[in-house]
Image (tube, rainbow, N blue to C red):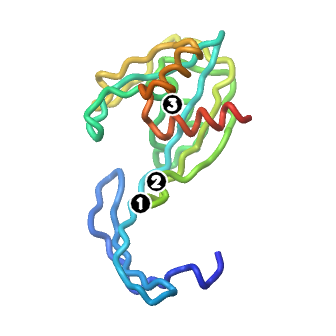
């Protein structure tokens, strides 16, 4: 970034923190002299897993409080402390879709919510997905989560008709289609 576009940080403070994320407030001075507060959410990185077999895609459906709706998404979740992104992808696929895979390929790494967040998203493709002999352990907030294998044509229809609204699922699918 060129120095003439980057603001100067005058001060920074953590306004809120919990085990999943923190919000800090930076007072910035922009090159044009304007000053103001900028709020940044810092959260744990997470994974999104695309598993395809026999023309079907693994999807999960769950209630999301933030949008007050049941959403349709790829299996995804946070990377735990000390866990590699690939291990997190393996764990999330098992927990959410009761599925394992022969191999995981890192497809992309992206930044999420650039205007407010410093979170990273690792998108993986699960190669050779099969049903796991033992179901994964869901956390308490995922009690209503339902996994299913959906024909790719139906998945694309859900995108076109606005039934899939999750930005991480949409971005992962766009990257998957362009590989």
Label 3 sits on a secondary structure element that is helix
| Badge 2 density bin: few <14, some 14–19, many ≥20, Cα 10 Å | few
Q: Taking 145 as reference, is 37 above or below it?
A: below
Instruction: Looking at the image, tell me whether mark 3 or mark 1 is earlier in sequence order.
Output: 3
Q: CA distance from mark 2 to mark 3?
A: 24 Å
| Residue under the image location 36 percent in, 55 percent down | 21
> Which badge, 2 or 3, is on the more N-terminal residue?
3
Is 53 situated left or right of 19 in this image?
right
Question: CB of mark 2 within 8 Å of CB of mark 1?
Answer: yes
Checking the image for residue 91, the label placed there is 3
Position of residue 120 measured from the top left corner of the image (x, y, whole percent): 53, 51
Image quarter where the N terminus lies is bottom right
Mark 3 or mark 1, which is nearer to you?
A: 1
On residue 116, the disc is 1
Where residue 75 appears, as percent x and y from the top left, is 48, 28
The numbered disc on residue 113 is: 2
């Amino acid at each position: 970034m060129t120095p003439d576009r980057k603001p100067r940080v005058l001060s920074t403070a953590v306004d809120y923190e919990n085990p999943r994320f923190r919000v800090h407030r930076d007072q910035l001075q922009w090159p044009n002299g304007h000053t103001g507060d900028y709020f940044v959410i810092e959260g744990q990185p997470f994974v999104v897993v695309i598993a395809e077999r026999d023309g079907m895609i693994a999807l999960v459906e769950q209630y999301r409080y933030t949008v007050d709706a049941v959403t349709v998404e790829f299996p995804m979740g946070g990377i735990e402390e000390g866990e590699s992104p690939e291990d997190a992808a393996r764990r999330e696929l098992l927990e959410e879709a009761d599925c394992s895979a022969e191999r995981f390929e890192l497809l992309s790494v992206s930044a999420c919510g650039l205007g407010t967040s410093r979170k990273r998203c690792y998108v993986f493709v699960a190669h050779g997905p099969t049903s796991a002999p033992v179901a994964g352990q869901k956390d308490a907030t995922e009690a209503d989560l339902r996994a299913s294998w959906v024909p790719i044509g139906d998945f694309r229809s859900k995108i076109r008709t606005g039934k899939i609204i999750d930005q991480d699922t949409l971005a992962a699918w766009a990257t998957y289609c362009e590989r």
